[in-house]
Image: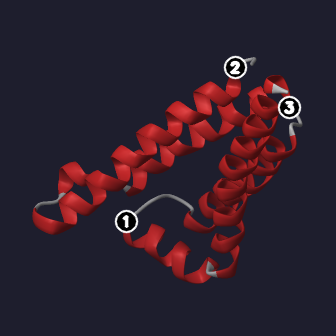
Amino acid sequence: MRRAVVGLIHMLGFVLLGGVFAWAGAGHFLKFRTIAGQLAERRLPFPAVLLAAGSSVEIVAGLCLATGMARPYAALALVVFTVVASVMMLDFWHYSGPERQGLRSAFTINIAVIGGLLLASSPH
């Protein structure tokens, strides 16, 4: 009984963690022009390509994490995505005041997400 409950908890955790990435990636495609414009404003190279690639990684790896397909690789791909996206978009060290605090909070949350993804990449 205990093993079944633990398995159910793990499955729910994977679905929630992977589902958030898949949902976010799909949302990026729904607001593609706006988000690509924000990337361009930050002077990131090839903003449309960058957005399409990152969002595709989120969707595919998120679904793989949620369904158990190549779970360790999917989790590690999402770690890389989260690190890169955090450094590119949550660069709180360039800001001050409330904007800095908001970006720093989001950056810190992403560190926790990376921790969860590292746990998800390891065998249970």
Q: Quadrant of residue 11?
A: top right
Q: In percent of the image, x 34 and y 44: which residue is there?
A: 108
Quadrant holding the C terminus = top right
Query: Label 3 amino acid?
Result: Ala
Q: Nearer the viewer, mark 1 or mark 3?
A: 3
Task: Determine which residue is flagged by label 1.
Answer: 42
In the depicted structure, whether residue 8 falls above or below residue 39: above
Q: Quadrant of residue 122?
A: top right
Judge whether residue 91 can be spotted in this image: no
Q: Secondary structure at mark 1?
A: loop
Q: Nearer the viewer, mark 2 or mark 3?
A: 2
Q: In percent of the image, x 50 and y 58: which residue is there?
A: 45
Query: Label 1 amino acid?
Result: Arg
- Mark number displayed over residue 70: 3
Judge whether residue 56 can be spotted in this image: yes
Q: How is the image coloured?
A: secondary structure
Q: Quadrant of residue 70?
A: top right
Chain-order first, disc 1 or disc 2:
1
Query: Label 2 amino acid?
Result: Ser
Q: Position of residue 37 (x, y in %)?
A: 49, 77
- Mark number displayed over residue 93: none
Quadrant holding the N terminus = top right
Q: Secondary structure at mark 2?
A: loop
Q: Secondary structure at mark 3?
A: loop
Marks 1 and 2 in Cβ contact (< 8 Å) = no
In the depicted structure, whether residue 32 falls above or below residue 68: below
Chain-order first, disc 2 or disc 3:
3
Task: Determine which residue is flagged by label 2.
Answer: 122
User: From mark 1 to mark 3, how far is it between C-alphas?
Assistant: 34 Å
